[in-house]
Each structure stands twice: as structure tokens, then as C-alpha cells.
Amino acid sequence: MTKAEGRVSFKRVAILISGGGSNMRALVESMAGDHPARPVLVASNDPAAAGLGWAAGQGIRTAAIDHRPFGKDRAAFEAALLAPLLDANPDIICLAGFMRILTPAFIRRFEGRMLNIHPSLLPKYPGLHTHQRALDAQDTQAGCTVHEVTADLDAGPILGQARVPVLPHDTESTLAARVLVQEHRLYAATLRRFATGDRARVDLT
């Protein structure tokens, strides 16, 4: 952080990942210059997540809480995850490919300041296998959605959407690749607006 940045009050952003963290990288790279937020923590439920090494290389604090020793005890896992989160004191938490369903109690603690990105045009196709479901339905458009996290899976208030056309010869992988490009754009744009306190919807094409 530069001396000039030290005089500015930035929103503190924690990012939760489970893998390579391409959306996390897009968010981190966007939080520079006159952006109203800065990353303070990247945490994962998988100690082997490649995104942790990348974040550490950027000078961002990281934490790994392996969910596997906790078995089906989600509350115990979340209690362990909560320790580095509270220590980082984030204003905003961004889920970026975080592949754990959070309990309502955990979500309530951060209500109104936790975001997620989902690879469909919600309310269509909550949950998994979104691209194949769009292809099976013969949709002409697909895309992604940034929403606030609530106790109902993929059902929180929509903060932004980006659309891509479904092409005649698309497969699940080709469609996913094009949607991912828009995910990076949309999440960064939505976080920037959200960090100013503006919840107006972002729409990209």
C-alpha cells in the first residue's frame, strides 16, 4: 500500500475460494488505483488450492481451513473458518468458486455484505451443472449473476448479470469458457459499485 493509499479509507475485502481462484484473481487485480476496496484475506477450504499461492505472491494474507477433518459438521468447520475472517475484519466477503454450502447462522453474521457469483442467469439454474442445463433447455442466452448471499441457495438479491449467446455448436465446456470471461468482468464491476454502498444492478453484455 502506498502512502497515498494509507490516507484513504478502503473497504476491506475477504475472498473465499476452493481452487485456482480465477474470479479471485480478477477481483484482486481490479482492486487498485481509485478502486474503493482492497483485498485483506484469501481463504480456502482446501490447503492445496492453487489460488492461495497466487494470492500470497501478491502479498495478500492467506488462510487454509481443510473441511475434510470436520466431516459433516459444517458448524465446526465454519467456526474454524471464522477465526481468520474475524481477524481480517472484512467489510465485504466475496465467494469466488467456494464450493461449500454455508449454514444460515454463518450467513446471518455477514448478512448484507457477502457476495457470490453464479454461472447462470438466476433465477434460472441454481446449484450445479448450470451450463449443461442451459443447453438441455435449448436456451438462446446464458450468462452469470452476482448476488447477495442469503440462507436460500443462489436466491439472494441480484446485484448484476452478464449475458452471452448460446451458439449452435456449443458444448458444456465451450459455453462455460465464454461465461467465465464475463464472470471476471461482472464480479469486478459489481464489487466496485457495491463497495461504494451502491446496490444498483450492473448489467453487462
Image (cartoon, rainbow, N blue to C red):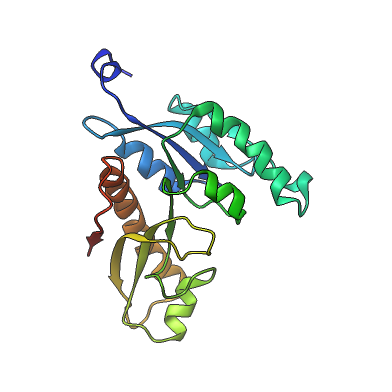
* Residue under the image location 45 percent in, 33 percent down: 90
Write down the quadrant of residue 158 in the picture.
bottom left
Would you say 77 lies left or right of 6 here?
right
Q: Position of residue 150 (x, y in %)?
A: 49, 57
Q: From this viewpoint, is residue 156 visible?
A: yes
Could you say where residue 117 lies in the image, as x and y percent from the top left? 42, 56
Q: Considering only vertical position in the picture, is 59 above or below 3?
A: below
Indicate whether 18 appears above or below 43.
Answer: below
Q: Which residue is pictured at 30% across the width and 54% down the height?
A: 186
**Is residue 102 visible from the viewing direction of this image?**
no
Q: Is residue 63 left or right of residue 204?
A: right
Q: How many marks?
A: 0
* The residue positioned farthest toward the top in the image shown: 3
Instruction: Give 199 or 124, whichever is nearer the viewer.
Output: 199
Q: Percent x, y for residue 162?
A: 29, 63
Q: Position of residue 124 (x, y in %)?
A: 42, 75
Near-viewer residue (59 or 199): 199
Which corner quadrant holds the N terminus? top left
Q: Quadrant of residue 24?
A: top left
Q: Residue at x 70, y 44 (%)?
A: 77
Q: Is residue 24 left or right of residue 7?
A: right
Can you say which quadrant of the picture contains the C terminus? bottom left
Q: Residue at x 77, y 46 (%)?
A: 70
